[in-house]
Image (cartoon, helix red, strand yellow):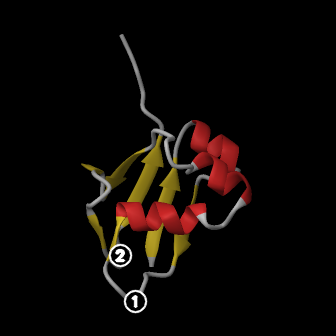
Amino acid sequence: MIKVLYFARLREQLGTAGEEIPSPAEPTTVADLAALLHRRGGVWSEVLAEGETILAAVNQEMARPETPVEDGDEVAFFPPVTGG
């Protein structure tokens, strides 16, 4: 299983703070996981639409789209945050 967490406006828009999804049979990446969620349609396709800036972390470390995701990993998706 892969634990997926959603933060800030993503959590609000999706109506959930997280979920567990079955690990794919073949190797996967952060981009693959986002695409899988996007294919759910509805609000999922809006929030994770191409061109939307969404950041990710795998096991609490910043990740890139090509970062591998394996069984047992925790993947967090969140919008960019600015501060000052």
Could you tell me the amino acid type at mark 1?
Answer: Ala
Please determine whether, in this image, residue 46 is positioned above or below residue 31.
above
- The picture quadrant where one finds residue 8 is top right
Image location (x, y in percent) of residue 77:
46, 50
Label 1 crowd bin: few (<14), some (14–19), many (20+), radius 10 Å: few
Image location (x, y in percent) of residue 24:
43, 83
Q: Secondary structure at mark 2?
A: loop
User: What residue lies at 43% left-to-right and 81% top-to-bottom?
Assistant: 23
Q: Secondary structure at mark 1?
A: loop
* Residue that sits furthest to the front in the current view: 51
Label 2 crowd bin: few (<14), some (14–19), many (20+), radius 10 Å: few
- Tell me the quarter of the image containing the N terminus: bottom left
**Image-based side of 82 in relation to 46, left or right:** left
Residue 25's disc is 1
Foreground pick, 26 / 74? 26
Please determine whether, in this image, residue 84 is positioned above or below residue 30.
above
Of circles 1 and 2, which is in front? 1
Residue 72's disc is 2
